[in-house]
Amino acid sequence: MSMDVVMLTKNSEVILDECLDSLYQSFPVKNLIIVDGLSTDQTLRILSKYPRVNIFSHRGTRAQAREYGIQQVSTEWFLYLDSDVILCKDWYRHIEPELKDGVGAVWGIIYEPIPNMRSKTILKHFNYVYRLAFKIRGGCHDMMVRTKLVRDIKIPDRLHAYEDQFIMDWIQRKGHEVCISDLAYCQHKRPLSDWHWRGLVKNSTAEFKGMVYTKKFKYFLLYPSFLLFAVLQFVGKYKVKR
């Protein structure tokens, strides 16, 4: 059974080819619904190479784009997929058993590569942190969603971050479970610009505003781990460059 996929894009050319290759190899795509924030790079050209792609231009916050994407879905379940992740082999085969009665969404765990990192202890630590992070604030990196539960969702327009947390809470308030898969996962490959100080400030500002709006202040307890992760990214990329 094929299913729709909703993806938000905006100047996503860096990882997009790898992302889409992994999607079409490991997921039964009915329609790939693209909500594009007026990209000016090669994003649209890359998308044109793939089948069953429907592109909708949209200017607005991430919350508005998420909601607009839902309105285009025609299948019982759909996949939210970020444009900077790579799905594991057989992603859907791993997650299909989780799509049970009473379940409203299933998230595949993310792994973020750290250059030159060989310590299994540190990698396990971040795996644990990402699971905690999802339980607090959700995540749409690679998440299956039961469509009928979110068809009427009204995500606050101001949420350019934490809109995924709002979606998770919405589903749970309707009496359905949001699960984390033990087998399905994706690799999160953020663009280098995210690790530049301007990118870090921009992303942190959006995160903080979302935290205040949703009152998920305990997420702040994970910030020391995220700071360590950012430092390891800087150090690792510097060593690779040299």
Image (tube, rainbow, N blue to C red):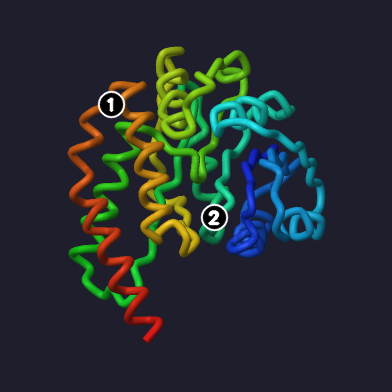
Q: Name the residue under label 2.
A: 84
Q: Position of residue 148 (x, y in %)?
A: 61, 18
Q: In this view, does 153 lie above or below 16?
A: above
Q: Is residue 90 among what the camera can see?
A: yes
Q: Name the residue under label 1.
A: 216
Relative to 26, 56 lies left or right: right
How many numbered marks does the figure carry? 2
Judging depth in this view, the residue of 81 and 45 nearest the camera is 45
Type of amino acid under label 1: Lys
Quarter placement of the C terminus: bottom left
Residue at image x 63%, y 48%? 10
Residue at image x 25%, y 47%? 129
Classify mark 2: helix, strand or loop. Answer: loop
Relative to 176, 153 lies left or right: right
Residue at image x 34%, y 77%? 238
Tell me which corner region of the image, top left, top right, bottom left or bottom right, holds residue 196.
bottom left
Type of amino acid under label 2: Asp
Relative to 11, 168 lies left or right: left
Question: What whole-number distance in Å separates the C-alpha atoms at marks 2 and 1?
Answer: 25 Å
Tell me which corner region of the image, top left, top right, bottom left or bottom right, holds residue 35.
top right
Quarter placement of the N terminus: top right
Q: Position of residue 29 (x, y in %)?
A: 71, 46
Classify mark 1: helix, strand or loop. Answer: loop
Res 94 label? none
Q: Where is residue 23 in the image (x, y as percent from the top left)?
A: 63, 54
Residue at image x 67%, y 27%? 68
Q: Is residue 2 among what the camera can see?
A: no
Crowd tier of the residue under label 1, counting other residues whose Cα lies within 10 Å: few below 14, some 14–19, many 20 or above: some
Instruction: Residue at the far bottom: name it.
Output: 242
N-terminal of the pair, mark 2 or mark 1, is: 2
Q: In this view, does 186 lie above or below 14?
A: above
